[in-house]
Amino acid sequence: MEVFEFDAPSLEVGCGDGVYSFLRAGGEFDPRFDVFQAVAELDKYFQKVDVYDSVRGFVQPTVVRGPDYRISMGVDHKANLLHKASSLDLYEELKVADANQRLPFPDSSYASIFSNIVYWLDDPFKAIREIGRVLKPNGRCCLMLPNTTFRDFSFYVRLCLRPGDKRYEFLEMLDRGRMTDNVRHARPDAAWREVFSAAGLSVVGHRRHLSRAVVEMWDIGLRPIFPLLKQMVDKLGEADLARIKGEWVSVFEHFLSPFLELDQSLSKDAEPAFHCYTLEKAG
């Protein structure tokens, strides 16, 4: 997204709690703040419950550096997540709206639009047409969309779901519905381009990212121990939390940064898992 600019008026479709967009915009939190402090229902974590969809009033982010730009409007279907996003000073306005439905904006309302949730929706073709409808002539949008390889790189899909091998059913607990309920639509570049064309959008930028090695690390990550890890973290004092967190980030940067720098060279055996498209609406 390095080349994409949020020209006003701007819109984010499916902004959630806004944390990722806040960081992308150059914002910084105090090290003592952690988004995981606000999670709930950890006892249902392996039952596909969204543990992030909660609000605890005493957990407020301490912003030490504001974002370099603001987004005019953020929409999401979960009011709790928008409540969290409201404290970031990133969005000028927030609105509850289901992107599965018609977007609650007039035609040609926004000069720039970003979304990383189109592939979660029931009908991505309808959603992309809606994005095209509310985009101004000559306006641009940035969409993150999965390639078919994204599902191929999933342990659960590759070992259990596709072959129907019951020996690997235990991976369903690890997947937690991500590949079956969330990543509903994954397509190769040519197929996505057909959808864009039908919506009156042309591709002016396209980058592939996330190699198999990176996705497989993300696929497991800390998910199996997350509820227990959260309980351990809750017992730390504020000073210990900030110190250990700093060391934690340093260790992960040491191992993960080289993988990201080598991401393209790691994709020689298979296309990367994700597309990042910059699209433009005809004038």
Image (spheres, rainbow, N blue to C red):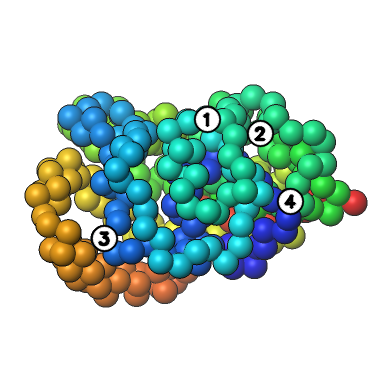
Front tag of 1 and 4? 4
Element carrying mark 1: loop
Between the C-alphas of marks 4 and 3, the distance is 33 Å
Between the C-alphas of marks 2 and 3, the distance is 38 Å
| Type of amino acid under label 3 | Arg
Q: What residue is drawn where x is 69% and y is 26%?
A: 102
User: In the rendered view of the protein, which quadrant contains the N terminus?
Assistant: bottom right
| Type of amino acid under label 1 | His
Q: Residue furthest right?
A: 283
Q: Which mark is residue 32?
A: 3
Residue bearing the label numbered 4: 9
Residue 208 at x, y = what percent?
Answer: 55, 60
Asked if disc 1 and disc 4 are in contact, CB closer than 8 Å, the reply is: no
Can residue 273 be seen at all in this image of the molecule?
Answer: no
Residue 267 at x, y = what percent?
Answer: 44, 64
Residue 38 at x, y = what percent?
Answer: 29, 42
Q: Taking 275 as reference, is 245 left or right?
A: left
Residue bearing the label numbered 2: 127
Front tag of 2 and 4? 4
Q: What residue is drawn where x is 26% and y is 46%?
A: 37
